[in-house]
Amino acid sequence: MRRLGPAALVIAGALALAGCADSDAGGDGGPGGEAELSVGSAYMPQPVSEELAAGFLTVTNKGGAADELTSVSSDIAGRVTVHETTGGAMREVKSLKIPAHGRLVLKTGGDHLMFEQLKRRPKEGQTVSVELRFAHSDPVEVEMPVKAATYTPTTGH
Protein backbone atom coordinates (compact mmCIF):
# COMPACT_ATOMS: atom_id res chain seq x y z
CA MET A 1 0.00 0.00 0.00
CA ARG A 2 2.88 2.38 0.64
CA ARG A 3 3.96 2.22 -2.99
CA LEU A 4 0.56 3.40 -4.19
CA GLY A 5 0.44 6.35 -1.80
CA PRO A 6 3.12 8.50 -3.49
CA ALA A 7 1.91 7.50 -6.97
CA ALA A 8 -1.65 8.45 -6.06
CA LEU A 9 -0.41 11.81 -4.77
CA VAL A 10 1.48 12.47 -8.02
CA ILE A 11 -1.58 11.61 -10.11
CA ALA A 12 -3.89 13.72 -7.94
CA GLY A 13 -1.45 16.63 -8.12
CA ALA A 14 -1.21 16.36 -11.91
CA LEU A 15 -5.00 16.29 -12.24
CA ALA A 16 -5.35 19.32 -9.98
CA LEU A 17 -2.80 21.26 -12.03
CA ALA A 18 -4.50 20.28 -15.28
CA GLY A 19 -7.82 21.49 -13.89
CA CYS A 20 -6.29 24.82 -12.91
CA ALA A 21 -4.74 25.28 -16.33
CA ASP A 22 -8.08 24.74 -18.07
CA SER A 23 -9.99 27.23 -15.94
CA ASP A 24 -7.33 29.94 -16.23
CA ALA A 25 -6.79 29.56 -19.98
CA GLY A 26 -10.00 31.38 -20.90
CA GLY A 27 -10.95 28.52 -23.23
CA ASP A 28 -14.40 27.13 -23.72
CA GLY A 29 -14.02 24.52 -20.97
CA GLY A 30 -13.38 26.58 -17.83
CA PRO A 31 -15.68 28.62 -15.60
CA GLY A 32 -16.89 31.68 -17.50
CA GLY A 33 -15.46 29.97 -20.57
CA GLU A 34 -18.08 31.11 -23.07
CA ALA A 35 -18.47 34.40 -24.86
CA GLU A 36 -21.58 36.39 -23.85
CA LEU A 37 -22.14 38.82 -26.71
CA SER A 38 -24.44 41.80 -27.03
CA VAL A 39 -24.58 44.46 -29.72
CA GLY A 40 -25.29 48.15 -29.26
CA SER A 41 -24.68 51.61 -30.72
CA ALA A 42 -25.41 50.32 -34.24
CA TYR A 43 -25.94 52.81 -37.07
CA MET A 44 -25.39 53.40 -40.76
CA PRO A 45 -24.73 56.90 -42.08
CA GLN A 46 -27.01 57.60 -45.04
CA PRO A 47 -24.92 56.45 -48.01
CA VAL A 48 -23.62 59.14 -50.35
CA SER A 49 -22.92 56.49 -53.00
CA GLU A 50 -25.40 54.38 -54.94
CA GLU A 51 -23.20 51.30 -54.49
CA LEU A 52 -21.52 51.48 -51.05
CA ALA A 53 -22.43 52.15 -47.44
CA ALA A 54 -20.63 51.84 -44.11
CA GLY A 55 -21.88 50.42 -40.82
CA PHE A 56 -20.77 50.89 -37.25
CA LEU A 57 -21.60 49.17 -33.95
CA THR A 58 -20.14 47.86 -30.70
CA VAL A 59 -20.03 44.19 -29.73
CA THR A 60 -19.63 43.73 -25.97
CA ASN A 61 -18.41 40.41 -24.57
CA LYS A 62 -19.22 39.87 -20.88
CA GLY A 63 -18.06 36.25 -21.06
CA GLY A 64 -14.80 34.59 -20.14
CA ALA A 65 -13.83 33.49 -23.66
CA ALA A 66 -12.85 35.52 -26.69
CA ASP A 67 -14.78 35.26 -29.94
CA GLU A 68 -14.48 36.67 -33.45
CA LEU A 69 -16.83 38.47 -35.81
CA THR A 70 -16.44 36.32 -38.93
CA SER A 71 -19.10 37.50 -41.38
CA VAL A 72 -22.05 39.80 -41.86
CA SER A 73 -25.03 39.76 -44.20
CA SER A 74 -27.87 42.15 -44.97
CA ASP A 75 -30.86 42.12 -47.29
CA ILE A 76 -29.88 45.53 -48.73
CA ALA A 77 -26.44 44.50 -49.98
CA GLY A 78 -25.08 41.84 -52.29
CA ARG A 79 -22.11 41.59 -49.97
CA VAL A 80 -21.07 42.92 -46.55
CA THR A 81 -17.37 42.89 -45.70
CA VAL A 82 -15.48 43.43 -42.46
CA HIS A 83 -12.65 46.00 -42.59
CA GLU A 84 -9.93 46.99 -40.18
CA THR A 85 -8.18 50.33 -40.32
CA THR A 86 -4.51 50.50 -39.45
CA GLY A 87 -2.45 53.65 -39.86
CA GLY A 88 -5.24 55.30 -41.84
CA ALA A 89 -5.43 52.46 -44.38
CA MET A 90 -8.42 50.14 -44.49
CA ARG A 91 -8.31 46.53 -45.61
CA GLU A 92 -10.78 43.71 -45.74
CA VAL A 93 -10.17 41.01 -43.12
CA LYS A 94 -11.66 37.56 -42.51
CA SER A 95 -12.52 38.34 -38.88
CA LEU A 96 -12.16 40.80 -36.02
CA LYS A 97 -11.41 39.66 -32.48
CA ILE A 98 -13.77 40.26 -29.55
CA PRO A 99 -11.74 39.83 -26.35
CA ALA A 100 -13.10 38.09 -23.26
CA HIS A 101 -14.57 40.73 -20.94
CA GLY A 102 -13.98 43.31 -23.68
CA ARG A 103 -15.43 45.07 -26.70
CA LEU A 104 -15.08 45.27 -30.44
CA VAL A 105 -15.82 48.85 -31.48
CA LEU A 106 -16.58 49.57 -35.13
CA LYS A 107 -16.39 53.35 -35.63
CA THR A 108 -15.76 56.09 -38.16
CA GLY A 109 -12.05 56.20 -38.95
CA GLY A 110 -11.54 52.72 -37.45
CA ASP A 111 -12.71 49.17 -38.00
CA HIS A 112 -16.08 49.07 -39.81
CA LEU A 113 -18.51 47.18 -42.03
CA MET A 114 -18.76 47.88 -45.77
CA PHE A 115 -22.07 47.23 -47.51
CA GLU A 116 -21.29 46.58 -51.17
CA GLN A 117 -23.51 46.15 -54.23
CA LEU A 118 -26.43 47.98 -52.59
CA LYS A 119 -29.82 46.72 -53.76
CA ARG A 120 -31.44 49.93 -52.53
CA ARG A 121 -30.04 53.12 -51.06
CA PRO A 122 -31.29 53.44 -47.45
CA LYS A 123 -32.50 56.86 -46.35
CA GLU A 124 -32.19 58.62 -43.00
CA GLY A 125 -34.90 57.37 -40.61
CA GLN A 126 -35.07 53.87 -42.10
CA THR A 127 -33.52 50.75 -40.55
CA VAL A 128 -31.31 48.12 -42.10
CA SER A 129 -31.43 44.48 -40.94
CA VAL A 130 -28.03 42.91 -40.39
CA GLU A 131 -26.99 39.43 -39.27
CA LEU A 132 -23.65 39.13 -37.49
CA ARG A 133 -21.97 35.73 -37.40
CA PHE A 134 -19.25 34.67 -35.00
CA ALA A 135 -16.64 31.93 -34.72
CA HIS A 136 -18.18 30.43 -31.55
CA SER A 137 -21.41 32.24 -30.65
CA ASP A 138 -24.84 32.09 -32.26
CA PRO A 139 -25.64 34.69 -34.93
CA VAL A 140 -27.10 38.02 -33.78
CA GLU A 141 -29.74 39.98 -35.69
CA VAL A 142 -29.36 43.76 -35.47
CA GLU A 143 -31.64 46.56 -36.65
CA MET A 144 -29.27 49.32 -37.72
CA PRO A 145 -30.89 52.79 -37.90
CA VAL A 146 -29.87 54.97 -40.85
CA LYS A 147 -28.61 58.32 -39.61
CA ALA A 148 -27.64 61.55 -41.42
CA ALA A 149 -24.49 61.21 -43.54
CA THR A 150 -22.72 63.57 -41.11
CA TYR A 151 -23.90 61.82 -37.92
CA THR A 152 -21.32 61.42 -35.16
CA PRO A 153 -22.30 59.46 -32.03
CA THR A 154 -21.63 61.10 -28.70
CA THR A 155 -21.58 57.87 -26.66
CA GLY A 156 -20.97 54.17 -27.15
CA HIS A 157 -17.94 54.53 -29.40
Image: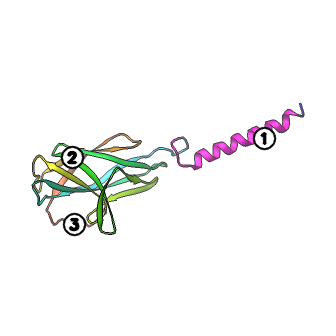
Residue ID at (64%, 46%): 20
Helix, strand or loop status at disc 1 = helix
Place of residue 27 in the rendered image (x, y in percent of width and height, measured from the top left) = 52, 45
First in sequence, mark 2 or 1: give its number: 1
**Residue stretch rendered in magenta on the structure:** 3-28
| Quadrant of the drawing holding the C terminus | bottom left
Task: Determine whether 141 is above or below 113 in the image.
Answer: above
Residue designated by label 1: 10
- Report the mark closest to the observer, 3 or 2: 2
* For the residues bearing labels 2 and 1, Cβ distance under 8 angstroms: no
Residue ID at (46%, 52%): 100
Is 118 or 20 nearer to us in this picture?
118
Residue neighbourhood size for the residue with mark 2, other residues' Cα within 10 Å, grouped as few (<14), some (14–19), many (≥20):
some
Question: Which residue type does callout 2 highlight?
Answer: Arg
Q: CA distance from mark 2 to mark 1?
A: 56 Å
Is 11 inside the magenta-drawn segment? yes
Residue designated by label 2: 79
